[in-house]
Image (cartoon, helix red, strand yellow):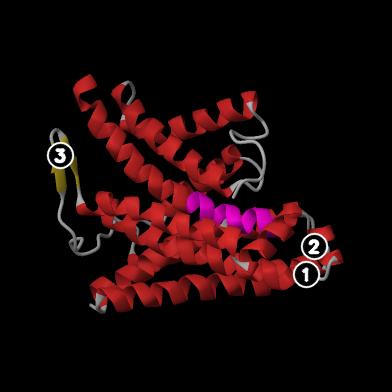
Amino acid sequence: MMEVLPQLVMLGIAKGSLYALLAVSFAIIFFTTRTFHLAHGAIFTLVGYCFYLFISILQLPLSVSIFLSFIVSVVTAVLIELLIYRPLRWRYASTTILLLASLAILITAPSILAMVFTANPLFFPNFPAPSVGIGNISLSGAQVSMFSSLIFIGLVLLLLRRTSTGKLLQAVADGEIVAEAIGINISKVKLTSVILGSLLLVPAAILYGYDIGIIPSMGFEAILIASSCAIMGGAGNFLGAAVSGIIIGVAMRAGTIYISSSWQDGIAFLVLVLVVLFRPEGLFRGKIT
């Protein structure tokens, strides 16, 4: 069993990089808007299917398909924010009501997509990158490309630390009342967080689809792991969320040495439960972007 451990660890880091990207995309929206944005998983699924429509059915060039997927992701997220979340906030709806509205979107979206595209797994064309093999370790082109998620995460963390937009997002995430008192447009900043988080969904959904294909229910796994990583990382700690994604990815893959791969999701939530029990404030203290 131990001879396959390096292979599993590398696969875990690759998949963990993807989970890290999902976690950061969710955390940016969650910690800024204070809305448990479960609909993020529905948008993740929608992006995957729209990319399939563009690249496989319409046979558009890869660059055009990616660009159109960005538009779909952002427009959908903005419409949910403006037409559902914001009116509910204006009516002083509780966080539970916002959560239920988001959950309704997450549950409804797969059924609609299954009616349009069928519930069978769909696969993108061959990934435009070769497989890589080093010794006993072999990774597909899609799995190697998952490491690019770390570049996106790095760019986002740089934006949060070094730009005025990032500082506004952090200010609202740290305290909405104080931010509003000093003249920050809260609604505008929340919308910015939704746009930024939704942009990060596109590379995540495309890499996920190239790796194992797409199914209508894939958003459930994505949002559960993303939200778990955000909680594990600690409140407002985007870097912690990313590191937690890699930890879960490695744990899920390496854990298959001892248990069936069908229980991988269970490993992720076992890690979350242990963290909540022993470090309820998260793995990483402080709000470190």
Q: Which residue is mark 1?
A: 184
Q: Nearer the viewer, residue 90 or 118?
A: 90
Mark 3 Cα-neighbour bin, 10 Å: few <14, some 14–19, many ≥20: few
Q: Which residue is mark 2?
A: 179
Label 3 to label 2: alpha-carbon separation: 51 Å
Question: Residue at image x 75%, y 68%?
Answer: 186
Quadrant of the rendering where the N terminus is positioned: top left
The verdict on residue 8 being magenta is no
| Image marks 1 and 2: residues in contact by CB distance under 8 Å | yes
Query: Could you say whether the residue bearing mark 1 is in a helix, strand or loop?
Result: loop
Mark sitting earlier along the chain (1/2) = 2
What amino acid is labelled 1 in the image? Ile
Question: Residue at image x 39%, y 43%?
Answer: 16
Q: Which residues are magenta?
A: 22-37
Mark sitting earlier along the chain (1/3) = 3
Label 1 to label 2: alpha-carbon separation: 6 Å
Label 1 to label 3: alpha-carbon separation: 51 Å
Can you give x and y, in whole percent of width and height, for residue 263 in the image? 39, 31
